[in-house]
Amino acid sequence: MHKYTFDFSDIDKLSNYFRSQLDPNGSTDRINFPSEIGEGYLSYYKISPEVFLLVNNYRANADIEYIRNPISEKDIILHFRKYALDHQLEKNQIISTYSDSYTPGNMRCMNGQQGEQVFITKGAEVKSTMIVLKSSYTDQYFMKNSDMAERVDNYIRYSHQHINKFYLSYKQSNLFDQIVQPDVDKIENYLYFIARGIRLLETFWKDVLKWETESNPFNINSAQVGNIYKVSNYLKNNIQEPFIGVDQLAAMAHMSRTNFFNMFKEIHNQTPLEFFNNKRLEISYNMIISDGLAIKEVMNTLNYSNSSKFRKAFFNKFDIYPDRNS
């Protein structure tokens, strides 16, 4: 068992601590794990002197225990993740254990005055990003807006009580993937991660502003959210077949048609048919523009029957026609 003890009071001290423990000879933003402990990296970015962005992307090759000590300041910790943790709440800390149960991604909100003990088992895949808001960043605003302070306090409290019922929205999921799994073909730098961290932070504030105790995200059935993602994965994997219809997709998700349709649109920001058609167009773009395949071949492969409708849809999405010479 490899054990690490730290807190989030100072990101420079945090970065130096893990650098010394894991990657003392490293020289990049990423702190790489030694192979006997894990495969992957940690990254730490300072959005501002009072707002920190932390990125975890690794596979554990050994059992790991993290002890995050509580601090005196009431900092806010936002933890966006696409792996599962089982939680036990104790008086002064959270006991969290890695779980291999399925999760489409969720978020929890914590108070820095409450510590945490996290157990990551060998073989665990950990992908998460955390945003730490120092109390010096939030206090002045909360003093001017007591309603917002109360909303955040409620958000933190209910986040703990219903910790598995938060889920990532469509926008949050996209930003998460861009931060944790950036496109390796692009030149990624410090500002790339800072910009997306700021946008991810914006989604939290918007959630708090619109949130009421009786409404989302706490009344969401997390199993149904998982079923929605299983259906969207099915659509992506069967893009060459005709669209099977909302009724059949709802049955696959074990949901009513209306509940399935509304939840699918909330999560993916588009209807099931729009999702299917957009994925099909994206694949057609790669086949024509990147791979140089003939339009007729692409249409046959992806089950398009009407050439004019295909060309129009292609243009509406990409602002070019598939046959660029026309």
Image (cartoon, rainbow, N blue to C red):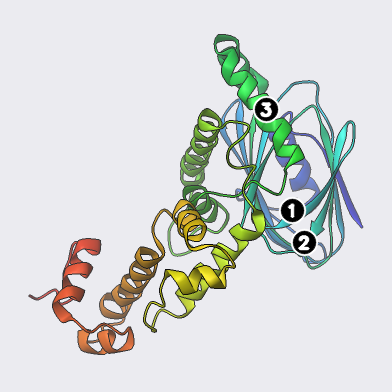
Disc 2 target residue: 34
Name the image quarter holding residue 63: bottom right
**Residue 36 in picture, x, y percent from top left:** 82, 66
How far apart in space, not on screen, are marks 1 and 3 (Cα)? 39 Å
- The C terminus is located in which quarter? bottom left
93, above or below 239, in the image: above
Label 1 SS:
loop
Label 2 SS:
loop
Amino acid type, callout 2: Pro
Disc 1 target residue: 23
Residue 141 placement, left or right of 223: left
125, above or below 157, in the image: below
Q: Residue at x 9, y 76 (%)?
A: 325
Indicate which disc, 1 or 3, sits on the residue closer to the N terminus: 1
How many labels sit on residues? 3
**Residue 291 in picture, x, y percent from top left:** 31, 82
Amino acid type, callout 3: Asn
Disc 3 target residue: 154
Amino acid type, callout 1: Asp
